[in-house]
Amino acid sequence: MDVTPPKRSRPRIDRFAVFWASPSLVWQVAFFVAPLVVLVWMTFWRVKNFKLEQDFIPDNWIRIFSSGFFYDAFLYTFWMALVAAVLITLIAFPAAYALAFIASPRTRTLAIVALITPFFTSYLVRIYSWQIILAEKGIINGVLGLAGISPVNIIGTSTATMVGYVTLALPLVLLIQLFSLSMVDKRLVEAAYNLGCGPLKTVFKVVVPSARVGLVIGGTFAFLFAFGDYVSPLFLGGSKPPTLSILITDQVKSGNNWPRAAVVAVVMVITLMATLTVMSAVAYRRRGGAR
Amino acid sequence: MSVPIMTLDKVRKSYGDSVAVHSIDLEIAKGEFIALMGPSGCGKTTTLRMLAGLDKPSAGEIRMWSRVMNDVPAWERDTPMVWQSYALFPFLSVLENVEFGLKQRRTTDAVGRRAKAMEWLDRLGIAGMAGRGIDQLSGGQRQRVALARALALEPEVLLLDEPLSALDAHLRVRMQTELARLHGELGITFVYVTHTQSEAFAMANRIVIMSEGRVQQIGTPQDIYRAPATRFVAEFIGASNILSGTLKESGAGGIVIENALGRFRSAGATGIAVGQDAAFVIAADKIALTRAADPAEPGLDAVTGTVAAEEFIGAVVTIHVDLPDGRSMFVQKQQNEVGRLGLARGDEVRLAWHPQDTFVIPG
Amino acid sequence: MNAATVRWILMGYVLLVFLFILAPILTLVAFSFNVDRFPALPWGGFSLAWYEAVFADETVSTGFRNTMIVAVTTAVVATFIGFATAYVDYRYQFTGKRAYLALASLPPTVPVVILGIANLSFMAAIGLSGTLTAVILGHVVIAAPYAMALIRIRLADLDPAIEPAAWNLGATPWATMGQVIVPFCKPAILSSLAITAAVSFDEFMIAWFVSGIHETLPVRILAMLQGQVSPRINAVGSLVFLVTVALVVVAQIAVFSWRRKRPLAGGGDG
Ligand SMILES: Nc1ncnc2c1ncn2[C@@H]1O[C@H](COP(=O)(O)OP(=O)(O)O)[C@@H](O)[C@H]1O
Ligand SMILES: [Mg+2]
């Protein structure tokens, strides 16, 4: 008599699952991870007679790190991004608070639409528009002139760059704050009032701590956006002084030195990764863990 | 016995380290209305999902007639299910929901499909809703759509997972009647999961009581009600008093259990050895209630105690009695019977019963 | 100061914030109709001349055509990838899922200037430098995460019993996908098509680095910006703005239509 072997359930490959899981994996590895890997690799190439040659030399890193303008640009970019993060967080908070706790649901919905829309639309032309507003003979100075006030010089300064950063990041930061404030239990706020907490004290003792994660995430995004932005420092700040993104484009478009641009880009990526790590530790640290 | 329509043979299901169902053996006969009952989390849904092929047994075998079903995918089976949440397709109309299964089979054309779906909607009394969206239906109507959707496939077995749990009490009773009627008319097998006793007892021919992934008892509602096999079943059914003690005698004439309240007789033999812990079970409605001062009826076992509380549910009254050793028992009587006694809290009463009405379970 | 005054001050502040957000857009549109060559006050007079100039400009119409090709292709591919990823997240548990999802959602957090230079060298290496295909490949990377997020939000509302219910009625997983999951996700898919198209329509950095001579419209605008300030930029900017706003608003209408009973942020009023 035949003895049929015990049926063992082979680990069958679920073709259905593989079909749906692979597109994103394949695409992001091929067109997101691979270019970044090439970027890192390229920092070790050489440029000879304006031609790129594969190599493995540390020269580009040495050149970049031994040039003063790189440090200046790095510190300026980092500082500006930091200021932007704090400033935008501060600008957004009262508005987010008002929309979360005072505005009617209708107003809130309208506000959300009005914030999502600019996040996706025409950053480039909006910065151009600020150029018109802030220019030497622009709208602000036009209005000031009518009032008999002498013109102010904004365009080409760090202030103008900052206006651009706020334009870029404010809608998203406001949305994130609004979302996290909406999660704050309104009863908590009322309880604080009942316990004799003044309104301002309630905001700082109850609302801000409860919305901390949202505030930190919002600020982090503001930093991220400002740190990587190219348009505002160029068209509003007049690339004086240049930021890291301007260094990159200059190296590529005029200098034709891709490897050195790649070095700057890799430094940016490392900085952003470090910032994200630190900030997520801050956001999700246990309450009262560090005092 | 002829071949069961469905067989679970030492079926087990585990998720990682946690075991949802331990080695279940169960044979389901054609045409029966079998209820799986037990507290939440005891593995009823898991068992039903394995019958439908939605979960794969970790061990053991599931057969339909004599075909082994373990590796047959859910969509190649013919065991439609009625879901606790109804799981109706929200973007389809009532009619399209009912047509869904027929469409997958491709046995009829669009016209035949429509006719059949309408026939089932009509049968369940919701033909007027055919064109509506699911969100325009009440809970009871959704329930009927879910039933029509499953029954339109005209299966041999219908699986139901707590189908009435989302309905209000009034509707639940009406649907019970309706399900029982459908079962009778169609002659197909119903496997019905519930954690509500009244549903199982009202409709099922046979009840499987489960606890923590194990079968505690399989039997007719009568069996389970009158002779719970384990302490768990007795407590879960809740209609009985359980008095524990030590088994003192065991023989052809019955057994004797002793505890602080006295010696109590019970009929029948058990596997429990003399000297071991045991308990006997006496149904609350099998107990005679008299004032302690009244003469005792000969041939009965009895305890005395004081009335602690009375609860009225409809015409039935439940009287809780505190016993001298700190335990308590309860008695269920028709209100008019108890009214005669004119009891008040603190009154001394005697509870008496026939030994042959009791059952012994391991302590 | 009583509570009502505080409320008024706060709402006034909100108004100011929105004024700041809207100011550049209003200025942009207004000056596209100003007859003066240099956009400044006082107002010179109404004119459509700049629009006429833009419509006559062949680089603009070529740019627009390129942008449309890129945006439509990107929208379709990114929505498909986003849908697939959202479904995998909804349906499966597996080791490495966190890393898988992180990879799928991270790209928008990387500055586009970095993606631009990375793509530049990469596309050169695989011989796609200077093609619209290269632009599309890069745009899908940053657009797919938005598609995934939108469709995932929709799937969160799908009763987990629905899919097994379809299998139980005889539908294979493929049939269930076509007859149940996709129809259920339709509003999110529409919304995702619009948003991903908008993301691509607006992207100028990756496109600038890899498109070569095949300029897209935003790249053309970037080039115009590097020249003289001109109301032609206002005109073309207004047109681009109109298209993206239309796309984003369509996307939001689709989202709100399915979340009518659940406002996106509803914690404020009880
Ligand atoms: N997919 C799953 N993964 C892990 N544990 C599960 C899963 N499904 C069910 N369980 C566990 O199995 C046990 C039985 O669940 P279930 O069959 O749903 O119980 P019932 O339907 O009787 O309430 C529960 O403890 C439950 O937590
Ligand atoms: Mg269950």
Image: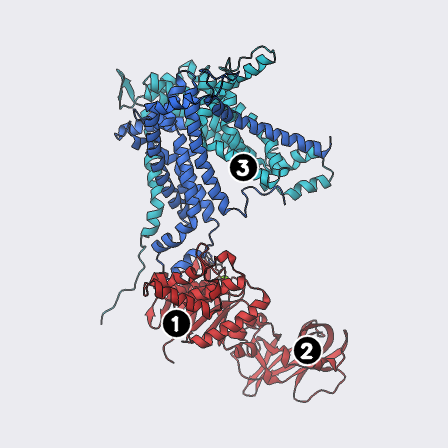
Chain colours: A cyan, B red, C blue
Q: In the image shown, does A100 or A198 lie closer to the viewer?
A: A100
Can residue B261 be seen at all in this image of the molecule?
Answer: yes
The label number, if any, that marks residue A100 in the structure image:
none
**Image x and y of residue C156, in percent:** 47, 49
Which residue carries the number 1 mark? B156
Quarter of the figure with residue B109:
bottom left
Measuring 63% from the left and 81% from the top, which residue is drawn there?
A: B286
Q: Is residue B171 left or right of residue C203?
A: right
Marking on residue B261 = 2
Q: Position of residue B254 (x, y in %)?
A: 57, 85
Q: Mark 2 and mark 3, same subunit?
A: no
CA neighbours of label 2 inside 10 A, class few (<14), some (14 to 19), many (20+): some
Residue behind mark 3: A112
Q: Residues within 10 Å of mark 1 (few under 14, many from 20)?
A: some
Relative image position of residue B188 (x, y in whole percent): 42, 74
Front residue (pair C74, C142): C74
- B51 vs A178, left or right, is left
Secondary element under disc 1, as helix, strand or loop, is loop
The quarter of the image holding the C terminus of chain A is top right
Query: Between marks 1 and 2, how big is the CA–CA gap?
Result: 53 Å
* Badge 3: residue crowd in 10 Å (few <14, some 14–19, many ≥20): many
Three-letter amino acid code of the residue under disc 1 = Glu
Q: CA distance from mark 2 to mark 3?
A: 73 Å
Report in which chain the residue with disc 3 lies: A
Q: CA distance from mark 3 to mark 1?
A: 54 Å
